[in-house]
Amino acid sequence: MPVAKVTDIAFGRLQSPDLDLAEEFLADFGMARAARTRDVLYMRGTDAAHHLHVTHRGEPKFLGFAFYASNEEELARLARVEGASPVESLDEPGGGKRVRLRDPHGFQIEAVYGIEKLALLPVRRNVVNTGPEKLRRAGELTRLPHGPAQVKRMGHGVIATSDLPKTLAWYRDTFGLLCSDDVWSGEPANLVSSFNRCDRGDDYVDHHVFFTMKGPKPGLNHFSYEVRDFDDVMMGHEHLKGKGKYKHMWGIGRHRLGSQIFDYWCDPWGRVHEHWTDSDVLNARAAPGLIEAGKGTYAQWGESMPARFQTYAVT
Ligand SMILES: [Fe+2]
């Protein structure tokens, strides 16, 4: 039995030397400020989570990410995992409680519970006349305002690991994650990456909340955020490209494993942030997949995963 069955990913934590620059990028990426203190920036999406991205002032560094625990008993159980902190009150906007854990590479992974929720932010209306329901927007014109994408929520976190079996076992055993798809190369026993989802029984969840890939250097590969729809992915792309100062990493395309339409951008310090929409959703009854790595493993259409991204890891 796993120690806990987390319900979702909550937020990522980074360290950056310039909070103004961090906020400017994240606003261009499609988030809004939830709170800012002298040394910490909290950004939110249009859903109710208090924040889904935290930036601490300091030298560029990947600080970790957080999952939502199901309840306080889970936090108490997680606090007994080797190397974990006791259950602590979160001394930051939104409050709540947490346990800090260390994954096999020493990255801080938090489990949080009871963080305050905020009122939803308005989302631009976008009704489409596609498929069998051709008259959804009968008589109404589409005129989309230009601007950033509308980030809804955090979707997943991705760790590059030099010891995939150990990393995978730790995340699954600690947080109750289920295998959606393992990817192998050469022979089935040689896993090169793994997509994992939350176990919420009969309830459907995103195909992956945690992805890990084998690489020479451990670190953060990317944080990923859900946006409203395909137009948002495209408008967000145009907005970030139009700024002329952000580095594009990969996309636009549609993933194979998870099926999301995706687009990847670097923040000013090279940390990769993904936009996606339209994920596969599975419940706990779905059988695990075992896929051979090859052309098209990571994209059904659009650009294949660039070589520079396959080993990308920041610490
Ligand atoms: Fe992703």
Image (cartoon, grey):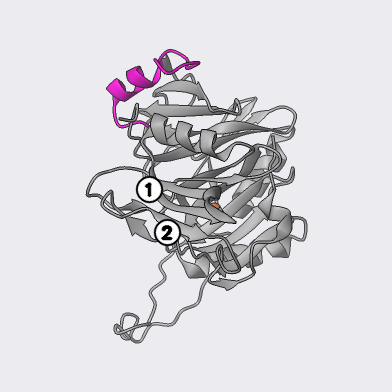
118 vs 103: above or below: below
Residue under the point 42% across and 16% down: 89
Answer whether labels 2 and 1 touch (C-beta < 8 Å).
yes
Mark 1 residue crowding within 10 angstroms, few (<14) / some (14–19) / many (20+): few
Which x, y percent locates residue 67?
Answer: 43, 34
The circle drawn on residue 123 is 2
Q: CA distance from mark 2 to mark 1?
A: 9 Å
Looking at the rendered structure, the secondary structure element under dot 1 is loop
Which x, y percent locates residue 110?
Answer: 47, 27
- Residue 146 visible here: no
Residue under the point 55% across and 54% down: 187
Left/right placement of residue 57 relative to residue 152 reads: right
The circle drawn on residue 241 is none
Residue under the point 51% across and 29% down: 109
313 vs 116: above or below: below
Amino acid type indicated by mark 1: Leu
Q: Is residue 75 magenta?
A: yes
Looking at the rendered structure, the secondary structure element under dot 2 is loop
On the image, which quarter does residue 244 sit in? bottom right
Q: Name, please, the residue furthest toward the right.
A: 245
Residue under the point 42% across and 59% down: 123
In this view of the protein, which residue sits in the foreground, 297 or 313?
Answer: 297
The stretch of residues the image draws in magenta is 68-87
Which x, y percent locates residue 274?
Answer: 58, 54
Amino acid type indicated by mark 2: Val
On the image, which quarter does residue 72 sit in? top left
Q: Name, please, the residue furthest toward the top.
A: 86
The residue singled out by tag 1 in the image is: 120
| Placement of the C terminus among the 4 image quadrants | top right
| Placement of the N terminus among the 4 image quadrants | top left
